[in-house]
Amino acid sequence: MSEPQPVTAICPGSYDPVTNGHLDIIHRAAKVFDHIIVGVVVEPHHKQTTFTVEERMAFLQEALAGVENVSVEAFGDLVVDFAKRCGARAMVKGLRAISDFEWEFQMGHLNRTLAPELETVYVMAGPNYSFVSSSGVKEIASFGGDVSEFVPPAVAKRCHEIFGNGGGPAA
């Protein structure tokens, strides 16, 4: 009997910015798969990013520094092409609400048509993160709210720099 091959999965997203909910999904996926590659979309077509790709990658790298089987890479092509390039056999996507499901359901079918060998695995957000989104964090920060309980410390600090009082207490 041959040795089982290690299974690599990707966790793609814009991560603008990374939230504690994203980190929860990545940590949980890291317990299931041998290697997780967090794929940061360089320039998402559906939205303008607040943070540069370098900042988004740095936030993730800092927040995931202690997780041995996780790495962070940027990509600017189709997610299925990125997955193939990484040798990934699975793609992990987090689901918070029905609206996430509708979008991910459509994308999952499109991706399966383009790359039937790539399995999409959906991980439900924990109850304490089901309401947290990157856009919600930016909205709160832009109006002076404290986002420190929703994002890693480096993100809260940067939000404070960008939005003034909106990032919470400056570290």
Image (tube, helix red, strand yellow):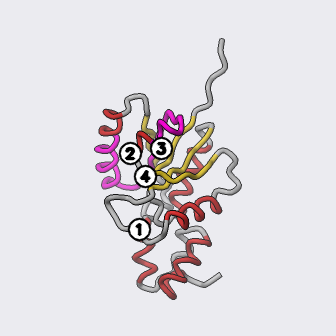
Judge by depth and name the residue closer to the eye, 117 or 129. 117
Q: Quadrant of the C terminus?
A: bottom right
Helix, strand or loop status at disc 2: loop
Near mark 4 (Cα within 10 A), the count class, few <14, some 14-19 or many ≥20, is few
- The percent coordinates of residue 93 (x first, y second) are 44, 47
Residue interval drawn in magenta: 82-108
Q: CA distance from mark 2 to mark 4?
A: 7 Å
Select label 1 or label 4 by which is in front: 4
Q: Residue furthest top?
A: 1
Q: CA distance from mark 1 to mark 3?
A: 22 Å
Q: Mark 3 highlights which residue?
A: 92
Helix, strand or loop status at disc 4: loop
Q: Mark 1 highlights which residue?
A: 49
Of the residues shown, which amino acid type is indicated by label 4?
Answer: Gly
Q: Are marks 2 and 4 in contact (CB under 8 Å)?
A: no
Of the residues shown, which amino acid type is indicated by label 2?
Answer: Leu
Q: Mark 4 highlights which residue?
A: 76
Select label 1 or label 3 by which is in front: 1
Near mark 3 (Cα within 10 A), the count class, few <14, some 14-19 or many ≥20, is many
Judge by depth and name the residue closer to the eye, 153 or 111. 111
Taking 27 as reference, is 100 left or right?
A: left
Of the residues shown, which amino acid type is indicated by label 3?
Answer: Val
Please report the residue visible at 42 percent of the width from the left and 82 percent of the height from the top: 142
